[in-house]
Image (tube, grey):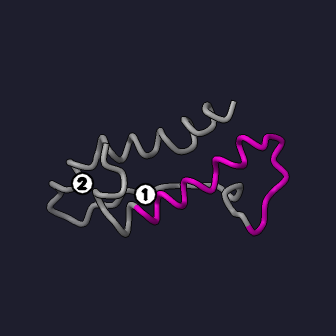
Amino acid sequence: MIVEHLEVNVLSVVSLYQATRSLLEKSITNPVFAIMGSGAGGLGRQPPVPSAAYGASKPMLPWYAVRINSEGNSAVKG
């Protein structure tokens, strides 16, 4: 069950970034890869989610968003 939540909540977004990275780099304007998360990713104010696997996967997405923004392509090379 944990793997399924990681695939949906984290790995799918990282895969989408990897797939679109070259298009973002070629953009002549200011490209944006916008990552949307949820309140379930907040470690300081954990909402009452019914699944520990779901809740544990949510903080990973904001972490990757920060890394992608600060490191660019080196953060998630495929």
- Give 35 or 11, whichever is nearer the viewer: 11
Numbered disc 2: secondary structure:
helix
Does 20 sit above or below residue 33? above
Numbered disc 1: secondary structure:
loop
Does 17 sit above or below residue 63? above
Residue in view at x 19 percent, y 64 percent: 29
Residue in view at x 38 percent, y 42 percent: 16
Q: Position of residue 65 (x, y in %)?
A: 46, 60
3 on left or right of 10:
right
- Which range is magenta? 44-67
62 on left or right of 45:
left
- Give 56 or 34, whichever is nearer the viewer: 56
Give the quadrant of residue 5.
top right
Does 19 sit above or below residue 56? above
Q: Is residue 61 magenta?
A: yes
Q: Which residue is mark 1?
A: 34
Give the quadrant of residue 60.
bottom right
Amino acid type of the residue that numbered disc 2 sits on in the rendered structure: Leu
Q: Position of residue 11 (x, y in %)?
A: 48, 41
Placement of the N terminus among the 4 image quadrants:
top right
Q: Position of residue 50 (x, y in %)?
A: 83, 42
Does 52 sit above or below residue 40? above
Q: Which residue is mark 2?
A: 24
16 on left or right of 40:
left
52 on left or right of 32:
right
Mark 2 and mark 1 residues within 8 Å of each other at the beta carbon:
no
Residue in view at x 81 percent, y 47 percent: 49
Would you call the spot at circle 2 few (<14 residues within 10 Å), some (14-19), or many (20 or more)? some
Q: For marks 2 and 1, give the CA distance.
A: 12 Å
Residue in view at x 47 percent, y 57 percent: 64
Q: Is residue 71 magenta?
A: no
Earlier in the chain: of badge 2 and badge 1, it is 2
